[in-house]
Image (cartoon, helix red, strand yellow):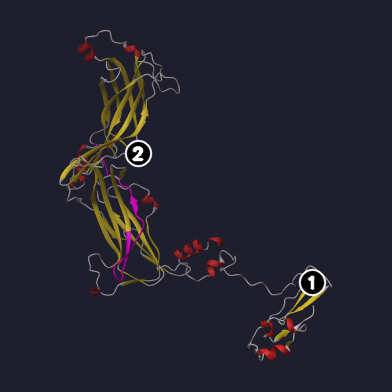
């Protein structure tokens, strides 16, 4: 291809340097271009001239294109660049893949620009996931990581016990939603772990604020629960709620108002100690259940006999039972009606027999100066008793006598308590389904009648096997050890509150400098550079 100076673009006419085939630099000026555009532009000092890449030629047919900047060889065959002896430079983590360890070990830049990189409440799993009782100790630590020198007022710890009950406002009959929630504070303990005490005024008169240095600071704490039967942790939708929570707060000064950072709230499961009131003994049952006038078997009564042993029981125990139910004529119906030709008693059979464990809640609340009470009940466990003479896999009965014996496993989350505002007790409910076989209807459409009886069930958390009357009197009825010392609202305060202290266990206060060896630094770097790990 021939070179033509007249066909050059304007920006090429202003370039005076060109590279020849032998590598020397020449200044060639088109005669017409300089006469019209003026003198050529000087070359910049220390200018690095572009070196064209060398290619291997696989064909003798080539053409040269001169642009004034450099010469490019065009070939009709395949061209490959010459192997360079210089190693390829290592790519950085901004746009290339590097070693997953090299990126974390050699990058000294902080993985975050936040002033407070971490602020958490660390409680061991063995305490968070276990049930606490009176006299136990809760331990943990507060971890705060700052990336810059940070002035702060304090780091405080809060341990709050609160209960809420739902009661009906009987004075407001017109409202459809006449249930009101009433909140009570069992205790509210606060402790300053670092910085100014809570009792001091946060003003400049107290001197300069303390500064958190860049790094990770861990402050341990311990909470001693007194031997007081606080109410058990419970949550029932639209009924009641009792919870115990721990959280930490970081307070920093601001121009118009203080800045507050909270950790996630850790909920502690608490259960009081329920001592047995008597030794274990059998509960004798001999009750007659009469029918109602609305049912077709109003003239039938069910007699339940037997007993339940190992009561009072501990939550989670296996309770042995032996029960027998049989149908008989209701003598009251025969005497009142004078009809001696009632249906054959053998045609009325007890199809099923069930035992329910019922949780009963009694809530008390003060609304508009008046004391209100609301009762709730819920079935927490149900067992269908298997007849003694039944076939394997069959739980129904076809006779007028229903007898069964075996064991019932109690739920593990049973714990009675009475906190003056909320009381929880348990009871047994026995149900018998009676069907009249003389009916012309088939088995699916026959009307059944349910006979129900109730009896109290005593549950305790201390085994009655080692029951001692003297120990019971000293440990359970002592006012300083029982929840009966809690006053009624509005002065709802326990006789003894938890004790919160700094330290109190083997973990000591520690500080780790903010650098690439800091555990928080490494963790944030791994989360940020997930494609390299």
| Tags 2 and 1 touching, CB below 8 Å | no
Mark sitting earlier along the chain (2/1): 1
User: In the rendered image, is residue 9 in sight?
Assistant: yes
As drawn, which residue projects farthest toward the top? 341
**Residue carrying label 2:** 412
Q: Nearer the viewer, residue 494 or 260?
A: 260
Q: Secondary structure at mark 2?
A: loop
Query: Is 45 on the left-hand or right-hand side of 277?
Result: right
Residue 411 picture location, percent across and down: 35, 36
Q: Position of residue 259 (x, y in %)?
A: 32, 66
Q: Does residue 27 appear in this view? A: no
From what the image shows, is residue 253 above or below residue 67? Answer: above
**Looking at the rendering, in which quadrant would you find the N terminus?**
bottom right
- The disc at residue 75 is 1
Residue lying farthest to the left in this orientation:
369
User: Which quadrant of the rendered structure holds the C terminus?
Assistant: bottom right
Instruction: Please state the extent of the stretch shown in magenta in the rendering.
Output: 248-276
Q: Is residue 149 above or below residue 494?
A: below
Residue 391, position as x, y percentages in the image: 44, 20
Q: Front-most of 35 and 370?
A: 35
Q: Which structural element holds mark 1?
A: strand
Cα separation between marks 2 and 1: 86 Å
Indicate whether residue 279 is drawn in magenta: no
Vertical comparison of 32 with 316: above or below: below
């Amino acid at each position: 291809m021939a070179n033509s100076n007249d066909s050059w673009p304007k920006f090429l006419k202003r370039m005076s340097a060109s590279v020849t085939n032998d590598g020397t630099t020449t200044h060639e000026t088109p005669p017409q271009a300089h006469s019209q555009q003026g003198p050529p532009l000087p070359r910049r000092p220390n200018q690095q001239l572009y070196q064209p890449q060398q290619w291997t030629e696989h064909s003798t047919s080539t053409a040269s294109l001169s642009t004034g900047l450099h010469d490019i060889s065009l070939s009709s065959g395949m061209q490959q660049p010459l192997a360079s002896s210089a190693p390829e430079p290592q790519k950085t983590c901004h746009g290339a893949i590097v070693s997953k360890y090299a990126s974390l070990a050699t990058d000294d830049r902080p993985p975050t620009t936040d002033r407070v990189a971490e602020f958490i409440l660390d409680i061991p799993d063995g305490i968070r996931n276990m049930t606490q009782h009176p006299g136990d100790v809760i331990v943990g630590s507060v971890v705060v990581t700052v990336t810059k020198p940070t002035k702060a007022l304090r780091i405080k710890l809060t341990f709050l016990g609160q209960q809420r009950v739902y009661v009906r406002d009987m004075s407001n009959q017109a409202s459809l939603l006449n249930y009101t929630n009433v909140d009570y504070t069992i205790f509210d303990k606060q402790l300053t772990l670092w910085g100014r005490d809570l009792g001091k005024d946060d003003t400049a008169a107290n001197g300069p604020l303390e500064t958190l240095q860049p790094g990770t600071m861990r402050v341990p704490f311990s909470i001693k629960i007194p031997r007081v039967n606080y109410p058990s942790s419970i949550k029932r939708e639209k009924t009641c709620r009792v919870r115990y929570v721990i959280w930490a707060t970081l307070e920093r000064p601001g121009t118009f108002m203080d800045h507050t950072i909270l950790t996630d709230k850790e909920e502690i499961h608490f259960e009081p100690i329920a001592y047995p009131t008597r030794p274990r003994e059998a509960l004798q049952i001999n009750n007659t259940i009469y029918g109602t006038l609305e049912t077709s078997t109003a003239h039938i009564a069910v007699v339940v006999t037997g007993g339940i042993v190992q009561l009072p029981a501990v939550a989670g125990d296996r309770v042995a039972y032996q029960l027998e139910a049989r149908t008989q004529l209701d003598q009251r119906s025969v005497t009142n009606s004078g009809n001696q030709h009632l249906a054959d008693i053998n045609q009325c059979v007890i199809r099923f027999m069930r035992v329910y464990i019922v949780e009963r809640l009694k809530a008390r609340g003060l609304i508009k100066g008046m004391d209100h009470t609301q009762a709730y009940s819920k079935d927490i466990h149900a067992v269908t008793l298997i007849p003694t003479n039944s076939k394997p896999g069959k739980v129904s009965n076809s006779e007028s006598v229903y007898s069964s014996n075996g064991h019932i496993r109690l739920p593990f989350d049973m714990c009675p308590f009475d906190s003056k505002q909320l009381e929880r007790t348990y009871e047994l409910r026995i149900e018998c389904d009676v069907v009249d076989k003389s009916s012309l209807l088939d088995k699916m459409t026959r009307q059944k009648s349910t006979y129900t009886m109730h009896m109290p069930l005593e549950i305790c958390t201390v085994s009655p096997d080692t029951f001692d009357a003297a120990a019971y009197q000293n440990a359970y009825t002592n006012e300083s050890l029982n929840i009966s010392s809690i006053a009624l609202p509005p002065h709802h305060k326990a006789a003894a509150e938890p004790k919160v202290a700094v330290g109190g266990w083997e973990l000591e206060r520690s500080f780790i400098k903010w650098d690439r060896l800091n555990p928080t630094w490494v963790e944030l770097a791994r989360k940020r550079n997930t494609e390299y790990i």
